Amino acid sequence: MFNDEYSLELYKIVREDEDMYYRDFVDFIAKTKVSKAIYHGEPIPMTYQGLFYNKKNRSDFVYISNILMSITDKITKEFVKNPEYRKIFQLDPTIEELVLHDPGYDVPVPICRYDVFYDGVNYMLCELNTDGSSAMNEDNTLGQLLLQTKAMQKFMEKHSVENIDMFTPWVWETADMYKKYVSDKKPNIAIVDNLEVGTPNEFDEFKRVYEENGFNCEIIDIRDLEYKDGKLCHGDYVIDLVYRRIVTLELLKIKDQIKPFLDAYMDNAFFMVGSFRSQLMHSKLIFEIFRDEQTQALLNTEEKKFIDEHVPFTKKIEERDAYEIIMNKDKYIFKPIDGYASLGIYVGREMREDDLKEKLPEFIRTGYVFQEYYDMNKCEFLEFEEKSPVLNKFTQVVGLFIYNKHFIAPYTRIGKDNVVSGARKYYTAPNLFINE
């Protein structure tokens, strides 16, 4: 079974010498706290185990990634050519203009993390992250530390285990895209975000890997960019390729401060991955759009079946939905349409009926969806309780990192609450590929 057979094996190893492995666990946690695995200024929480997955599981992840990329392509092409279809996305006019602008390549979502509830047999999509997809640093930093623990060293006497690198593949995917669509020359690269809200440790690691592979790379606040002589610049640094990390919602908030960047983009003065077309899949409306009759007309039988079986019911909240939501609140989770990082999420089964009634006008006014809550089969992960090893059940959200339509590796968070995210108590479970 997915993960659990390996968790049990690791647990049995730790039971052989509980005191030694507990001391090793304490040492491991101390190392994580001084590592570069930081989220909002705090160390990433860890247990003594990552997410074990094997070749069969990886094959599932590749299949899910491929079919979602196919659906993504079809939706994006229809959006660009069909004004009537665009209306169902309800985009801000500024964003719609940016989405319609041709980025110079035909990959609508060059980088994403598509999150899925997966237990090895059953799976259901959770949400799609495109703009500013992150967490590669915490997975790889913690994964490498985890492989050095005594328990994993013992485990690897029997198994071939790999924490898949999430940085180098992206460096070469972006370089290959630039070579294919622009020029054979090595581009000057800029990692661009609003640095007040970005993830600097991750940017530093991407910069390091770009430079290790022979590229010039700078980390630049989007507000500090200049557009002069037909080039996007930062001081004397002329930028050829932008790796956009700023989330579209954050970009909208500061659009009046970034006119040079936006003008240069519309003039094709630089090559940007990812383009603003990725916003189409990032919106929480996308699951409702999947089931719209206009979308269904674009899809083949396999894609329709995939959506029917693996995409939760989702709908924008309107006044007419109030009765259904109140009467069946435990069935639903409520998410802001343009939200990210699990902010602003409410779970119906956690709310009193009166509180939900009070919140509904805000949901309607600010733009929320209600979505079918998925109760998944939980997996076992190793923890220490009062210095003793235990196997506890956790919900796991497996994020599929996809670069230029190629599945790379999963990033996983586990938790015991009704929502698994950095906004609640959780652990990161680094990807541990059983390559055998």
Image (cartoon, rainbow, N blue to C red):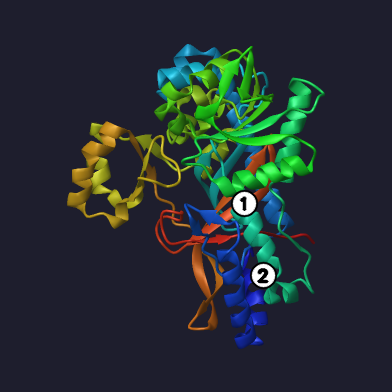
Give whichever of 340, 7 is nearer the camera.
340
Instruction: Please state the horizontal and vertical placement of residue 23, each as a whole percent of the image.
Output: 60, 82
Q: CA distance from mark 2 to mark 1?
A: 24 Å
How many residues crowd mark 2 within 10 Å: few (<14), some (14–19), many (20+)? many
Q: Which residue is mark 1?
A: 137
Is residue 263 shown above or below 343? above
Query: Mark 2 or 1 closer to N-term?
Result: 2
The answer to which quarter of the image holds residue 81 is: top right
Q: Which residue is mark 2?
A: 6
Left or right placement of residue 435 versus residue 132 in this view: right
Outermost residue, right side: 184
The secondary structure type at the circle numbered 1 is: helix
Instruction: Please state the horizontal and vertical placement of residue 67, each as a whole percent of the image.
Output: 63, 37
For discs 2 and 1, the disc positioned in front in the rendered view? 1
Q: Measuring 66% from the left and 61% from the top, which residue is drawn there?
A: 143
Q: Quadrant of the N terminus?
A: bottom right
The secondary structure type at the circle numbered 2 is: helix
Is residue 308 shown above or below 270? below
Is residue 225 shown above or below 68? above
Q: Amino acid at mark 2?
A: Tyr
Instruction: Please state the horizontal and vertical placement of residue 348, each as a whole percent of the image.
Output: 30, 51
How many residues crowd mark 1 within 10 Å: few (<14), some (14–19), many (20+)? many
Q: Measuring 53% from the left and 38% from the top, which residue is drawn there?
A: 307
Left or right placement of residue 320 versus residue 241 in this view: left
Q: Quadrant of the C terminus?
A: bottom right
Instruction: Please state the horizontal and vertical placement of residue 117, each as a whole percent of the image.
Output: 52, 52
Q: Amino acid at mark 1?
A: Asn
Give whichever of 276, 87 is nearer the camera.
276
Give whichever of 181, 263 is nearer the camera.
263
Left or right placement of residue 240 versus residue 29 in this view: right
